[in-house]
Amino acid sequence: MQGNETMLFQYMEGSSKRFIIPVYQRNYDWKIEQCKRLYNDLIKVHKENRNTHFFGSIVSSRDDQLGMQEYLIIDGQQRLTTVSLMLLALHNLMVEGKIEVERKALSEKIKNEFLIDKYEEEATRIKLKPVKDDAKAFMALIEDEEDHIKTSNITINYNYFYNRILKKEISGEDLYNAFCRLQIINIYLGSEDNPQLIFESLNSTGLDLSEGDKIRNYILMDVKPTKLQEKYYEKYWHKIEQCTNFDVSSFVRDYLSIKMQSTPAMNKVYLKFKEFMDKNPFNNSKYTEDLEDRERLMEDLLSYAKRYEILLKANGPNKELNMIIERLNRFEATVTRPFLMEVVRHSEDENHEISRLSKNELLEIFEIVESYIFRRQICDIPTNALNKVFVALNNEIVRYDGTIENYLEKLKYALMKKTASGIYPDDGMFEEGLSNKQVYLMRSKNKKYIMERLENYGTKEIKNVWNLIEEGTYTIEHIMPQKLSTDWKKELGPDYELIHEEWVDKLANLTLTAYNSGYSNSSFIKKRDMKNGFSDSGIRMNQKIAKYKKWTLEELKDRNEYLIDRALNIWPMVDTDYEPAEKIMDSITLADEVSMKGRKLSKVSFLGVEQSVTSWADAYIKVISTLHSENPMVLFKLATDKSGEGLSNYVAESEEGNSNYSKLEEEIYLWVNTNTDTKLNLLRKLFKIYEFEEEELVFYLSDNNEKNTRDMNSSQKKRIKFWSEALPVFKKETGKFKNVNPSNSNWISTYIGHSGINITTVANLNDIRVELYIGKKDKETNDDIFNFIKESKDFIEIESDQLFVWKNEPENIASRISIEYEGIGISDESNWEECIDFLSKGVNAILKYIAPKVDEYFAEKDI
């Protein structure tokens, strides 16, 4: 085996050379992402006038035939194929006259030196021979056949280069010259080397560099002289490693979340860091005169690493703050760190001036974050939206008036106004969630957290509950045991089975003890009065329990009420009188499972780009267009899929004479005649295929409530007025709709504790209704929930004395259970009082008779 540095163009040029991809190699699978990176690198090579740019290694063996040099490519086919596609696109554009170059013979040189041997027969004249279907796709491009294989990565990447070169970011000649500066390590296998063993060795699993390692090398490798490199390492990088407990990858991920306002996947942190370097003020030039820019980058990284260290190790100067941080860490609330690093930054004493956030404000902000996280946990609100919430939260707060003044109150306002999957559960939601939560069945860390807070909140005589549980001294004990003895059955009364089933694992029936084995299944009186029993306990919550004379349903309800009141103090709801001078647009992400029926859209943000849109259909098309540009193969396959299943129903090769199709590009048409919720569900399915996080797509909603009245028709004005009168009654009579504002739409909805499910009140001019809307992400789940509730249809309708309308709508991936009142609507204002009364009673009927069935469904699912 021999290896040497060589220029790629020298390795490739020569009409007699052939590059054969062995059949045991995988297909060509570089995507547009890798092509984009190569092209961007070539632009930098040109603009920075670099002599060389390292492009990796190519491993090959020779098998010379008569008049030819055949290279069997063991490793490097992705690079060779990609460069060949770029050169082919460059050649074709020159031949077509779409780009001009001074060297008139350049197109012929590219064709005859790098792509084909014009003197050979057709079967052997193409220099690169990919495997399997890749060879057919490459041949079609070379021969300029009309029927290119559109679903092949070969064709897709060729089209990318073709269109990118057309943008003329650099000239065709400069692009070719940059290609000529690509340098490789040419590893050549001799006759004694076994190509298969070499291939296995190259592809064997080893200990890869971490993302942090790659970033360190990227920043420091070009620093010259070596002494300066060592200085930077000791002064900055090693300190960053120490601050982050040597997990630099996780830290840089959070750092990039702050700087780029989106969280990269862990395996793409290094690539995103390079993108960040290209776009931000910190220059990445290797030349000495620009090293001060690189030092500024490392200074910034180190300053954030020091803030990160406080959040990671709870080792700041503020002991009260450290205690909150320790709890957040035990609660594994790492998702909060991008926001909290910014909060810590705002509290720092810059230039020895007065801190911008006071100590008390800093503490309260951390307490609010803790309460927000915990309330959502208890109310079973999905956590997938939290990443986006905390990444964007600081910018959202500052955007209200462009300053960090009044930061605490602006934070409260920002969290209070969140809805759907970003909601801050109000007291009603939290109380209901905690009362019904099977706390003993929660994850161990969550149970420990709850018991520690209940025991230690409000006192300076703090017990180390976490450690005492973890070392086995304390355990979480059922007061009423998991298995009832005869004495317990007698004490609970004839309904002991129902009481036990409902209450055994709830918070009201749990406590801490160091003597669990002694308690066993003993009666309550024995547990209370025995040695080391509740009466003899040093644990505060047990001293409270010891005051009870028995333990029945009455005591369980009483303790539940006490614990709820205590929880409302420990984890309070935020409240503020702050209002921004200018209304900030509401936003949701694709991850939010909430109906957008009737909501207007202003703009969308995806992959760091904001686009104004005129409608949901316009947004749908623009988002799919962006997805398509990332990987065209997906839609090409769907368009040619004639199975009539799934997403293929919504993508076609032609419009088929139907105006409901919208053209995306040639032979790609999208069916747009669907309602808003269906469009959102289709986007979710596409995001899964394209491997994008749903939180990356943000919709900014128009404010239906503040449209100028001259832009509203009479019906819209009437609805605004009706909801303004109805909402105060709804809030008072139902305890719901607390964060809902009047709308010019014909409906408003309220959350009932499960994402994708809400109670909606609909007020039309001539009829009104109340409905339970079930709109989870997939049809199967909606069907399951709907059918589970419908099993109790007779019971529900008899007990509620209401006739419900049951509609399962699989075509819209939604289900509805409603109470309808025809013959009366909001057209006549004299009927409004009756309408509001009907809607209020309807909401309460659903809350009382149907919502518990929803809870029951999810409880059974959890079990």
Image (spheres, helix red, strand yellow):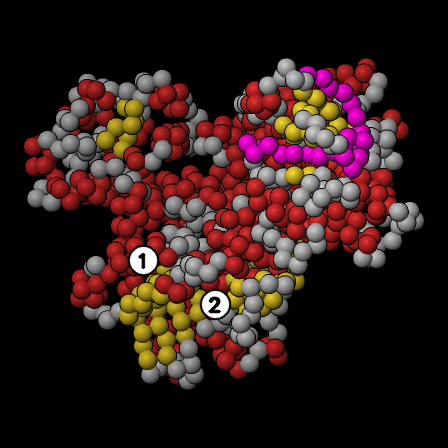
Q: Position of residue 584 (x, y in %)?
A: 62, 58
Q: Look at 41% across and 64% down and name the residue there.
A: 812
Q: Can residue 20 be found in the magenta stretch?
A: yes
Question: Quarter of the image holding residue 796?
Answer: bottom left
Camera-nearest residue between 187 and 536: 187
Q: Amino acid at mark 1?
A: Asp
Camera-nearest residue between 842 and 71: 71
The residue stretch that appears in magenta: 1-25
Q: Look at 70% across and 30% down and name the residue there.
A: 65
User: What kind of element bears circle 2?
Assistant: loop
Q: Amino acid at mark 2?
A: Asn
Q: Is the C terminus in the top left, top right, bottom left or bottom right quadrant?
A: top left
Q: State how far apart marks 1 and 2 are (Cα).
A: 19 Å
Residue sticking out furthest to the front? 66
Question: Quarter of the image holding residue 860?
Answer: top left
Residue corresponding to mark 1: 783
Left or right for 370, reference 780: right
Residue corresponding to mark 2: 675
Q: Can residue 462 be found in the magenta stretch?
A: no
Left or right for 573, reference 484: right
Q: Position of residue 642 (x, y in %)?
A: 46, 61
User: What kind of element bears circle 1?
Assistant: helix
Camera-nearest residue between 618 and 43: 43
